[in-house]
């Protein structure tokens, strides 16, 4: 899994902890082409909050089709 870009620039030993996630629950029935590729993959989005236990940075994350994007949150 890809971690936030900021952690790659951080020289500390970052530990990213993930909070409770929520996932959209649309149903994507698998549809295959004749090569056996699923052409209707699950597009549900899982999102939540995560933070670095080492430096205290916080992000909102969102995962769809195996790709995770992070939005950094202002520190509280
Ligand atoms: Zn960190």
Image: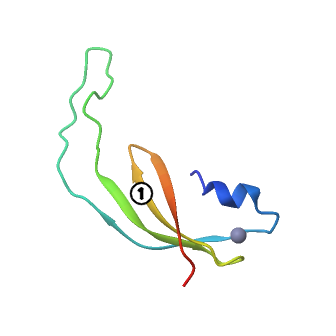
Q: Is residue 48 above or below residue 8?
A: below
**Front residue (pair 64, 70):** 70
How far across and down, in percent of the image, does residue 70 sit?
51, 58
How far across and down, in percent of the image, does residue 34 sit?
26, 14
Q: Is residue 63 above or below residue 34?
A: below
Q: Which residue position holds label 1?
A: 62
**Front residue (pair 34, 3):** 3
Mark 1, residues whose alpha carbon is within 10 Å: few (<14), some, or many (≥20)? some
Residue found at the very far bottom of the displayed protein: 76
Residue found at the very far right of the displayed protein: 11
Residue found at the very far front of the displayed protein: 74
* Picture quadrant of residue 7: bottom right
| Picture residue at 72% right of the left edge, 55% below the top | 8
How far across and down, in percent of the image, does residue 63 sit?
41, 53
Q: Is residue 48 left or right of residue 1?
A: left
* Picture quadrant of residue 51: bottom right
Q: Secondary structure at mark 1?
A: strand
How far across and down, in percent of the image, does residue 65 sit?
38, 43
């Amino acid at each position: 899994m890809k971690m936030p870009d900021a952690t790659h620039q951080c020289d500390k030993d970052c530990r990213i902890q993930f909070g409770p996630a929520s996932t959209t629950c649309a149903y994507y029935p698998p549809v295959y082409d004749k090569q056996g590729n699923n052409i209707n993959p699950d597009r549900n989005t899982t999102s939540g909050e995560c933070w670095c236990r080492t430096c205290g940075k916080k992000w909102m994350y969102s995962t769809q089709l195996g790709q995770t994007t992070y939005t950094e949150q202002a520190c509280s």
